[in-house]
Image (cartoon, grey):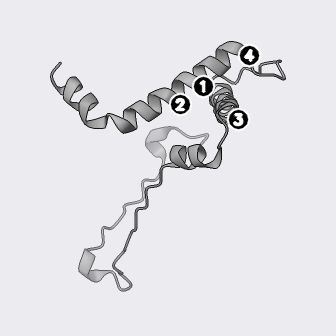
Amino acid sequence: MSTEEEKWSHPTAQLIEDDQIPEQRQLKIALVACDTINNLFNAYSNWNTLVRSVAWILRFIKYKKSKVIDSFKFLSVPELKNASLSIIKRVHEEAFHEDIVRINTNK
């Protein structure tokens, strides 16, 4: 690295054709989609417990995005309201998916 860039050696790469690769195998991929939000909803039978768990998850996501640590040990009222609205919004998106798509395409 102490020499100039023009004096660096540039190795040439040789491309190998697909039929020349001796151990070429077919790759099979399985894609599984799971709705973790519905799993979370089904895990709680109590509304308050669900709201609090979603609020903690939203706080964690906020922390991971901003890296700002909230010094509060307890959830605040705005956090609980935001969690409630997030749950309601998610349920509405699932229940009225066709209507939402139809409204958005007409804009």
Residue at 46 percent across and 33 percent down: it is 90
Disc 4 residue crowd, few under 14, some 14–19, many 20+, Cα 10 Å: few
98 relative position to 10: left or right:
left
Q: Amino acid at mark 1?
A: Ala
User: SS class of the residue under badge 4?
Assistant: loop
Classify 20 as above or below 81.
below
Label 4 to label 1: alpha-carbon separation:
11 Å
Dot 3 or dot 4: first in sequence order is 3
20 relative position to 65: left or right:
left
Q: Closer to the camera, 24 or 85?
A: 85
Which is in the foreground here, disc 3 or disc 4? 3
Dot 4 or dot 1: first in sequence order is 4
Q: Closer to the camera, 29 or 11?
A: 29
User: SS class of the residue under badge 3?
Assistant: helix
Give the image location of residue 45, x and y in percent.
65, 43
The dot on residue 76 is: 4
Give the image location of residue 51, x and y in percent.
65, 30
Q: Which residue is mark 1?
A: 83
User: SS class of the residue under badge 1?
Assistant: helix
Q: Assess whether mark 1 and mark 2 are in contact (beta carbons under 8 angstroms).
A: yes
Dot 4 or dot 2: first in sequence order is 4
Q: Assess whether mark 1 and mark 3 are in contact (beta carbons under 8 angstroms).
A: no
Q: Amino acid at mark 3?
A: Thr
Q: Closer to the camera, 8 or 91?
A: 91
Q: Pick the quarter of the image with the N terminus.
A: top right
Disc 1 residue crowd, few under 14, some 14–19, many 20+, Cα 10 Å: many
